[in-house]
Amino acid sequence: MDSLTVYWRLISAQIRGQMQYRVSFLLQLLGSFSTVFAELLAVLILFRTFGEMAGWRVGEVALLYSLVAIGFGLSELVSEGFDDMSVLIRMGDFDRILTRPIPAFVQVMSSQFALRRLGRIAHGVVALTLSHWWLRLAWSWVDVLLFLLALAGTAVVFFSIVLIGAAICFWTTERTEVQNVFTYGGTELVSYPMHIYNRWLRSVFLWVVPLGLTTYYPVLHILQKTDPLGMPGWLPFVGPLIAPLFFGVALLIWRTGMDHYQSTGS
């Protein structure tokens, strides 16, 4: 609870600081929204040309796309500090973090709070609105709860990927680009139905990095579509619950990296 209090105070200070320059903040927000909105336009152009994708209509893919976009945007809000992990280690700033009476995890996570990432979240909300308009889904309370669980699970998985990438810096010092394969690359991949990919690629994003479990299967249930992969019917409900387990693995890698950390001497 003490760590949460400290985190909230540090984040609150950052938010107040960023809002001091409101024009700059609005421009950053608009730039973030415009950049990612181009991705949604690409999806719309694709379906305008081909009509459907492996039995999925544009509104159905838009629902899946919105879940991925909002989940990734939420993770970006709180994970940007870990993106700078290689700089903290290389410049010797992580040594200073270790001397403070606050957990290093909390300090790194609160070092950056990227309000401009709200642009990606807003873009996901636009996709969700379009999907509802096209499909006219009758959402039950189970569907709403499942969507919210899937949203939280997706954000946790994306955050965990960034955390693992930051932990690897304890051994490599420099940040590796492998992380981007599963974050930015992952957003592109899981924004489309999983059954269109080769078996090995599906296996990676279902059972190694469980983004498919937190996005594709919950949306399948909400749309009441038959799973072409023949997975069990309970998987849409279990998938989002796997996200905390994946975060536990990421946290274990982070703590192992800290135990083996040696200062660069900078």
Image (spheres, rainbow, N blue to C red):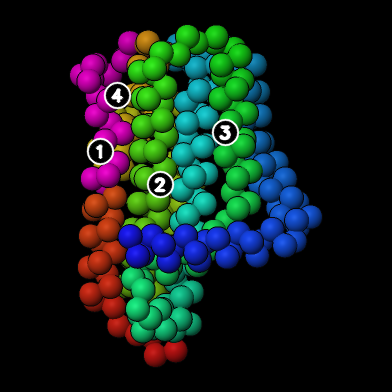
Q: Position of residue 5 (x, y in %)?
A: 41, 62
Q: Is residue 125 left or right of residue 204?
A: right
Front position in the image: 125 or 55:
125
Badge 2, how many Cα within 10 Å: few under 14, some, many 20+? many
Q: Is residue 101 left or right of residue 46?
A: left
Number of the label disc, if any, that sits on residue 124:
3
> Which segment is the magenta one?
226-246
Label 3 – label 4 distance at C-alpha: 21 Å
Label 4 – label 1 distance at C-alpha: 11 Å
The residue type indicated by label 1 comes to Ile
Label 1 – label 2 distance at C-alpha: 13 Å
Q: Position of residue 66 (x, y in %)?
A: 52, 30
Q: Earlier in the sequence, mark 4 or mark 1?
A: 4
Q: Earlier in the sequence, mark 3 or mark 2?
A: 3
Q: Is residue 117 left or right of residue 148?
A: right
Q: Secondary structure at mark 2?
A: helix
Discs 3, 2 touching: Cβ within 8 Å: no
The residue type indicated by label 4 comes to Pro
Query: Would you place residue 190 above or below residue 260 in this image?
Result: above
Q: Please give the residue where the numbered disc 2 appears in the rendered image.
A: 158
Label 3 – label 2 distance at C-alpha: 15 Å
Q: Please give the residue where the numbered disc 1 appears in the rendered image.
A: 242
Q: Quadrant of residue 260?
A: bottom left
Query: Would you place residue 38 above or below residue 59 in this image?
Result: below
Front position in the image: 247 or 216:
247
